Amino acid sequence: MSGKEEKNKLDCIKVPPDKINKEEIPSIVEERTSERTAQEVLKKTMEEGIQTVWERFEKQQPSCKFCATGVSCQRCAMGPCRIMGGEKVRGVCGADADIIVSRNLLSWMATGAAAHSDHGREVAETLLQTARGKAPGYGITDNAKLNALAEEYGVKTDDDKETAERLAISMLEEFGTLKGSLKMMERMPEGTFNLLEASGLMPRSIDREIVEAMHRVHMGVGADYVDMVAHGVRASLGDGWGGSMIGTEISDVLFGTPTIGKSKVNLGVLKKDQVNIALHGHNPVLSEMIVKLAAEPELIQRAKDVGAEGINLVGLCCTGNELLMRKGVPQAGNHLSQELVITTGALEAMIVDYQCIFPSLPYTAACYHTKLMTTSPKAKIPGGDHYTVNPENAFEQSKKMLEIAIDNYPNRMVERILIPENPVESIVGFSVEALRSALGGSLKPLLDLIIKGDIRGAVGVVGCNNPKIKQDHGHVTLAKELIKRNIIVVETGCAAVACGEAGLMLPEAADMAGDSLAAVCRSLGIPPVLHMGSCVDNTRILVLAAELARLAGVRMDQLPVAGAAPEWYSPKAVAIGAYFVGSGISVALGVMPPITGSPNVVNLLTEGFDGVVNAKFWVEPDPVKAAEILAEHVEAKRSGLGI
Ligand code: SF4
Ligand code: MSK
């Protein structure tokens, strides 16, 4: 189905008045979020009695012990089964805790890998349509990157359009390739590549490993928990070094490789006298078109005609991060702020693509004048207005949505508006290319600083928010603790938004770093916490680590680096964690996955993989303790290298 479909009239979901004790609101707000502007808007939201993710989270407590520990199974109609109470307790088919837990985990890994890789596929399809002249309004922005990628794939020609077409086809073939390997795995240093090959974890194609994962979780197929989880790592590696990496690289080709620049973050980026439009989700294909069209004089005039001073686009989650990195579009917030952007009362429209979008948003929007517009046929939300967008029609559909948003401006309920003050400035845009050029054309100076010890190591702090953890507390505390120990922090996703909002992405944040890291940051004019992009852009961290390892002549697992996801919620984060570990980068999780029903699976992840890929997971909810673990790991790796 395409085009606009009927909007259901929804009722605003309110918290029953007898459930609100107004005196308790300030302390509850304090417990739920540590971000200043989120606190301000959440307080107003609670006073207005509007339901948010936190009320829904509370209603779900206490959570089911079987589900929380991963020992419930709904994989077939002989069940559902729930098992607890020793080795002899089994599901109807005979599955024990190891089987049920590993099947559930593999299913999450496959889900996460599928989500990010499908995003990558859509970006590559956009390149193909652009090259064929079938995507009006799109073009190639970074020709140098196009040609470098084409060289890598062996498809470079003298004509950029032909090169783009051939590159897009080669990349799309990676999803179901018969070659039995993925091109970009060759970016790994030789030692890491060989280790993976020897361990049997090399993905054969992107889609194949995901499909095989879904096959393995069917009743009567996978029954060996080690094989199951190992396959999850293989499917995740196919995402990290395949689908997601294609997403990042081709987004750069189409929309520009990020360069270092300034922008602003937090809910204060909304503007009182402008038409505010939030762009939410993950894929930049639509939102880049909207950014382009919002600058059209015709649309700006339309905004003035309805009494506004202009059009103000703001980002949310990773669509926001994509735009922030490339275009400096201000970022309104991360995952747990998506409802709060609406409850400011100042948002004319939220336009979403897919992933991490609460299905409740149309109900939140119904409490105000906000229009919630969905655009992906994969992610329609009942109650939202749907406008199917594809590369062929993005130009006209984006214009239509912008017009609807503008025309909605006079419907604001002015007395209910609260826009917090003082958005925080952030330095953003640290692609590997931008870093390399800031360092004079090579990453060697960074490696030298690590060898010398001025920078002890690097940690990628990534991932989401989760209402189980006070919003942003895990990210910000962990980042502060790491930089204090002279460990540079690179970030993506909601973690990056959190640290931007906390002022850690300003050069002045060097004052919070240890002496030697602070001196490095001051001399380069960079913050100690670097924004590297969206969730698919975790591949930038892989590329950075691979290049450092190559320069040093070591495997990736030998580097003094690690990953962390202090507030993760998404199966995509599980896939990211798995492809980090599979690549030799150990990861600290702040939230325990539902696996504790199988001590064997827990041991495999926290110890067993160390013997195969020289990397593992830790689970540590306390970000201060997590920083200690990570710092110890960094120092151990340094000792291993004799530096
Ligand atoms: Fe129960 Fe086995 Fe079916 Fe799962 S697969 S629901 S454990 S019978
Ligand atoms: S948006 S996957 S909540 S980081 Fe990428 Fe944030 Fe996690 Fe979504």
Image (cartoon, rainbow, N blue to C red):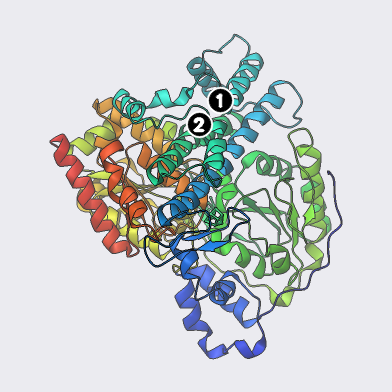
In the image, taking residue 486 as reference, residue 300 lies left or right, namely right
The residue type indicated by label 1 comes to Glu
Residue 503 vs 197, above or below: the answer is below
Question: Which residue is at the front of the view, 472 or 242?
Answer: 242
| 3D distance between C-alphas at marks 2 and 1 | 7 Å
Q: Secondary structure at mark 1?
A: loop
Q: Residue at x 77, y 67 (%)?
A: 369
Q: Which residue is mark 1?
A: 174
Q: Residue at x 69, y 21 (%)?
A: 131
| Residue closest to the far top | 158
Q: Which residue is mark 2?
A: 242
Count the labels in the image: 2
Number of other residues with Cα within 10 Å of mark 2, as a class: few under 14, some 14 to 19, many 20 or more = many
Residue 18 vs 281, above or below: the answer is below
Number of other residues with Cα within 10 Å of mark 1, as a class: few under 14, some 14 to 19, many 20 or more = many
Quick check: can you spot residue 527? no
Residue 376 vs 432, above or below: the answer is below
Contact between marks 2 and 1 (CB within 8 A): the answer is yes
In the image, taking residue 405 as reference, residue 439 lies left or right, namely left
**Quick one: label 2 or label 1, which is nearer the N terminus?**
1
Q: Secondary structure at mark 2?
A: helix
Quarter holding the C terminus is: top left
Quick check: can you spot residue 523? yes
